[in-house]
Image (cartoon, rainbow, N blue to C red):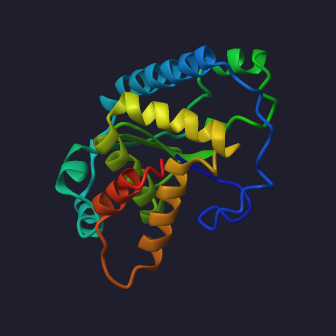
Amino acid sequence: MVVMLKGMIAGYTTEEFAVPFPRLSDEQVEWFIQQVCAYIDRQRQTYRDRAVPLDTTQLAIMRPFFPASALNSTRVVTLAPERVGNPPFFGELAKMGFKAGSLPEFAEMAAITFVDTVVSHGPYENRTLCHELVHVVQYEKLGLPEFAAKYVKGFLSGGSYEANPLERNAYELEARFAAAPKPFLVQAEVQSWIDESRF
């Protein structure tokens, strides 16, 4: 997901975004993970039929960075003026003590990836598409259940959306892509974060 906020994201300056989270029990964390996993799966099903493959220009730009498996499986859809709403379980999280502003606002995000289906709220810029394709590779490597678990735990331990290691990885690689004098392999970079237990 790419969220439009002020501050340094790829540089990891996230203190201004962090809002204290309530302490959750192991059972509550597991519930949270299951809700996220189910939501991602439902959203993928909702948008997949409306989505299309990457076009030839997008493929040409992204091919030096991404594996064919990710590029061939990815489908994209642009919503306008429709927006992706917040997950229905956010209300339960508020009851658990999450304060207003501590959870991401999905309608404010430039794009959101649901496994291999990228939903954008506007035209696809190459940098945003790169960020979302990093998430596609993360899903490929981890699988949906493990991605959801690492996303929730990273969100809770990081204290914000921006401090989540899965997002840090995507923002870092997106920034490298934007400044890249030569291609690099996103798949290898994601695997190195997995091998180093950075997620």
Residue 177 % position (x, y)? 42, 71
Which residue is drawn at the image coordinates 67% and 22% (left, top)?
A: 90
Which residue is drawn at the image coordinates 74% and 26% (left, top)?
A: 23
Nearer the observer, 146 or 118: 146
Residue at the extreme bottom of the image, as rendered: 181
Q: In the displayed structure, does residue 115 sit left or right of residue 17? A: left
Q: In this view, does 122 lie above or below 102?
A: below
Q: In this view, does 180 lie above or below 46?
A: below
Which residue is drawn at the image coordinates 36% and 46% (left, top)?
A: 138
Residue 97 % position (x, y)? 80, 22
Q: In the displayed structure, does residue 4 sit left or right of residue 37? A: right
Nearer the observer, 122 or 63: 63
Do we see residue 23 in this rendering?
yes
Total labels: the figure holds: 0
Residue 58 % position (x, y)? 30, 62
Residue 163 % position (x, y)? 63, 51
Q: Is residue 163 above or below residue 89?
A: below
Which residue is drawn at the image coordinates 65% and 53% (left, top)?
A: 4
